[in-house]
Structure formats: C-alpha cells, structure tokens
Image (cartoon, coloured by chain):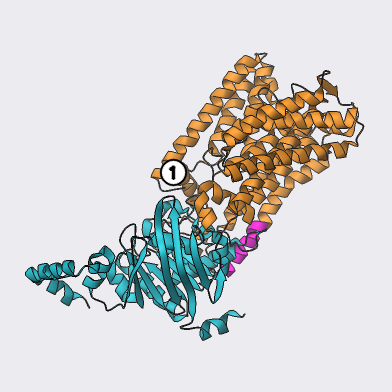
Amino acid sequence: MTAEKSTSAPLALDRADARVKHEAGLSGAVRAFLDRVRSGDLGSLPVIVGLVVIWTVFTSLNPVFVSSSNLVNLLFDCSTVGVIALGIVCVLMVGEIDLSVGSISGFASAMVGTLWVNQGWPVALAIIAALAFGALIGSLYALLFNRLGMPSFVSTLAGLLAVLGMQLYILGSTGSINLPYGSALVDFGQLMVMPKWVSHTLAAIPGLALLISGLRTFARRRAANLSAPSVTGLILRVVIITVGLELIVAYLNQSRGIPWMFGLFVGLVVAMNYALTRTKWGRSMTAVGGNREAARRAGIKVRAIYLSAFALCSLFAALGGVLAAARLASASQQAGTGDVNLNAIAAAVIGGTSLFGGRGSAYSALLGIIVIQSIASGLTLLDLSSSLRYMITGAVLAIAVIVDSLARRSRASHGRA
Amino acid sequence: MSESPERSASIGELVLSLRGISKNFGAVSALTDIDFDVHAGEVVALVGDNGAGKSTLVKILAGVHQPSSGTIDFRGRAVTLPDPRAALTLGIATVFQDLALCENLDVVANIFLGNELSPLRLDEVAMEMRAWTLLNELSARIPSVREAVASLSGGQRQTVAIARSLLLEPKLILLDEPTAALGVAQTAEVLNLIDRVRARGLGVVMISHNMEDVRAVADRIVVLRLGRNNGVFEPDASNQDLVSAITGASNNAVSRRAERLRMERDHSGNAQAGEQRP
C-alpha cells in the first residue's frame, strides 16, 4: 500500500531520477537487503550466522551451555574485554591499531590495586587515576604518530612491553593484590544484577527510541519533500526488537538476571554508536579512516581526530582493566597478559569492523566479544584445555578477516564502498 | 549579513593577488617567482603543459602546500594559508583534480564533510535537502545521495566535488580540470555554472587543457611554463599564440617563422579547423 501511495504522490526530491531502482514497502526492503548482501555489504550478518552456528554446536554437545545461569556468567565475562574491544573499534575506524590494550588494562588494574588497597586512596579516585593514565598513554601514541610519523603498530608494540614492565614494577615482589570482597567495586564485578523491573524497562527503551526517532524522521522527510521509508517496516522492526529483547531479559531473569556491569558495557556501546554515526566527530573519524588526505582537504583537523581515537582506545582499555580487576577481585601480574590483547582486537574484527579503516560499528565490539566468550565458555563446559580454545578462536578470527577481505573485494567490484 | 553589500560592490575589485610565489620540492623548483591576480567577477584560466606548476599553484591557494617564498594578498589583506581549513575559512573553495572525496561516505556526507549541520546531532534531513538543492542547481544526474561515493561514475563524482565547493558560499573558487571527466551536457552545465558564479561577483580560477572550454568562459588566460609566468592572453588570442606560449616556442622568432611556414604548407586542415571554431 505504501508503494502505491508514493507513486501517486508528486515526485519526491530524491526520486526524480528514473534510472535508479527504489525499493518500496516491506518486500522492497527485504529485496534491497538481499541485494546489499550479494554485493558484499554484509554488515553484521556473518557474525550473527557464526553465533548461531557456535551456539547450536555447543548446545548439542552440552545443553548446559544455553542455560540461563551460564549465559549470565557469559555476560559478566563479556563486559571486561568487551569494553577494551570498544576502544579497538575507535582506532580501527581511523585505520590504525593499538596492540598495547592488554598491557594498559593490566596496568590500570594494578594501579587501582596499589592506590586503593596499599596506599589507602578512595576507590573512586584510584579508578579516575587509572583512567587518566590510560588516556595519557593513548595521547602519547597519538603524539608519536602525528609528530614523528611513527606507525601505530610499532609505537603500541613498544608500549605493550613498556607498560607491562611498569605493571610488574608497581606490583613489586608480592605479584598480586587482592581486592576486598564486599567492597562496591568487587560486588559490581561479581554480583550486582539489575532488579527485574529495571531490566524489563531498559529492554523496552531501544524499541521506543527507534519508534519515536523513526516517526519524527518520517514526518520531517515528508515535510521536506524527500522520500520516507515505510511506517509498516518501522513498526515491524520496533515490534521484533522489543519482543526479542524482552524475551532474552525474561530468560536471563530466570537465574540471576542481567549484570549491571554488562549494562554499563551496553550503555557505552550505544553511546559510542551514537557518537560514531550521528555526530560530526564520528563523521570525521569515518572520513579519516576512508581517505585521510580528503579529510584534511575538507578542513578536518586530522591530528585531533587521531588523538581522540588513540586516547579513547587507551581510556577504554584502562576501564576494561578496572572492570577485570573487579571481576577477579584481584590485581595480579597476569592481568591483561595472555589472550586479553588479541581477544579484544579479534572481537572488534569478528564483529565486522574493518582492519582497513573507515568501516565499522560500535556494535561489532558487542557481537564480537559474545562470539569469543561463547567459544571460551563452551569449551570450558566441555572440559577442553585452553590449547584448543586458542586454536578455535584463532580459526574464527582468520575466517572473520577472510570474510572481511572477500566482502571488500566484492564491494569494490559492485561499486560500493 | 555583511556579505551581500560586499559582494555587489566588489565587481572588478582585486580578490587575490600573488607576488613572487616560489615553491621548491627538494631540488625541484615547481614554481618560480609567480605573479597572479584574480578580480571579483572574473574567470581566470590557468593553462600550461604537464608539469608547468598549475596544480601546485592551486594547492598553495587551497592551503595544501605552503609556498617557499612570496606573498599572498586576499581581498586586500596579506594572508598565510597554513592548512586547508584556513583557506576554506577565508572563502577559497577548491575542486581538486583528484576530487578528494571519501569513497566510504555517501554523497551528503561528502558534500558536508567538515561543515556538518548541528555537530552533536547531525541534521540529516536538512543536509540531504541542501545537497539535492545544490546538485539540482548543477543539473546533476546523481541517482541517490545516500549511496557511497564509491558507486558513482567519474562525472558524477566531479559534480559532487563541485557541489561541495559551492556549499560554503566562497569568494574565490579554484577548479582544477573541472570538465576533464564530464560528458558534453555536463561540461556545458559546468561552464554555465562558472558563468553564474562569475555573475554573482565571485572570482574563478580554472585549470583546463581544453582550449575550447577555456575560450568559452575565461576573461583572461594566464600561461605557466616550467613553473614561471609565460604571458597573459585575451580569450580571443589565436590558438597558435597560446600553444606557442604553452610549449615555449614563442620565445624564438626563428621557430615561430618555421612553424608558420609549416602551417602554410598544409594550410587546408588548419584553415578549416579555424573556421569551424565559433
């Protein structure tokens, strides 16, 4: 019906060119989606397909995997590395990399342990100091990159070692500091979950926000004589999202419920998604990642954009370290070492953020870390060693990068960015 | 608000004046001692052979390169152009030869890049409307402004780049090969557009290898050769004079005479070409 209405109305400003196919209505939206996928504009599709495969396999091997309590644990585990992966999305957007996020997260947790437990600082102050340190390290990378032209690959590799050394230094001979159980920080990392009514209310917000903004855009576009997407499709999307989220929340509420820490992570993802897609800063990030010289000639302060990307990445890494310390109730020499670094980078890439810059989304951190933690959790339930976990995660990462490269080539041959 | 009286009063006023501009890239002197003037309401064509320094001069004016020596006066004030933002703020808009578009962004995002409406909550509807208005003024044939620029053809990209230069209501527009990638109709539209821009009292600098286009719109033709000024011509100057200035043959009376004799020998083709020109 919407299709007929729009053809009988006077031609909209953006529909005057007869050569372009414009899909209208619901079936049109589906066709346009299939068209996009075929030409290599995959979006989050590969990661969602991958997630379904992984979950099906693990559930068939051990049904405990999809139990409510295991999934709640999964969400607790996702939040720490997920926040770090969110920072990685920022640097990948501008086509750079930060290899030192693991070290920075480890150092941040060590800082909180030392300042709070050993030196007796208020916990909030210790956290702020750790975050400030993170932002400082990122700014240093940006300085080296902007002024000296040092590739971020090398400067952050140097940072990886240097910051790891600092972590070992401040932890001293004891090697680990236990954070007190019962403190707010540890409770936040291990116990605190949302009351049921809060989680159900929060799950209703995305649909509501989508509905309101969608209707406003619809009205404004119509008023401006631009074509508008169909309202039916919008309402369908709102219903699917709301019902889906409420069902997930209800299922998780059967055991402990949604962790506040995961709520913080999702909140950060949504905020970053807004910043990347709906602000001038985010547009500049995408532009710098796509074509640095063009961005500079358009008057964008390219150096400031790089500074913000590196600083945000390290800031998120430090925050992830603080959350990890809360989750483990300790700050140790092992914090942030091993697979933290690569899990964070792998999460961003598996989630669909391109290694080549200029393409990505904050949601890739969320989706990617759920994939990685699902593998970890499933293999733990099967009582398999970490050796196998590394191999499987490595294979998934390789597949993700292959999909990215192939999709990029396909997009190029189909004339899409 | 202060713009309209300035614009109407300033026809013929000196907008841009370069004196003694030189630019070295290492041991190579791309530009040597260039003097260059643009008045309001005037189209100046910048012609020269490959490597003559045209694009370098445009990049200096756009703030992409900084001159090694020399002064730039813009609207009566001495200015420096340390970066592209400074040039844009002064009112110098540039369409680069390589267009400088971000292929991963859509048409609207490219047109408004660096000048987005409401920075903290991008006003996509208003930007899309303005984008269509600009593109329609250029009689552009862009299928959709929500497609990434990667999916557009060369001519369409050219139009997007020109639309972007007009967004900020500049005082001076620099066009580096604006018609090179365009079809017949779109070339005419761009030339019409240059006429319209001139009528609004803006200064236009146009680089082109197409003498026909240059003659069609230019008020003056400035020739560069090997990084130096090599003469200023009226648009009705003969093709031979122009070509000689561009290639450097005019400096030599003997070569000019030899050229003329050679032309007279196979005069038939050349004479026809001369008559065909409107």
Q: Chain of mark 1?
A: A
Question: In the rendered structure, which segment of residues is drawn in magenta?
Answer: A213-226
From the viewer's perspective, tell me whether residue A320 is left or right of residue B83. Answer: right
Residue nearest the viewer, comparing B49 with A369: B49
Residue A383 picture location, percent across and down: 68, 13
Is residue A224 covered in magenta? Answer: yes
Chain shown in cyan: B
Question: Which residue type carries mark 1?
Answer: Arg
Colour in which the image shows chain A: orange
B47, B154: nearer the viewer: B47
Residue at screen point 42% across, 39% down? A409
Callout 1: SS: helix
Q: How many marks?
A: 1
Residue A11 appears in view: no
Find residue A184 and report its horizontal and vertical position in percent. Answer: 88, 34
Residue closer to the observer: A178 or B50? B50
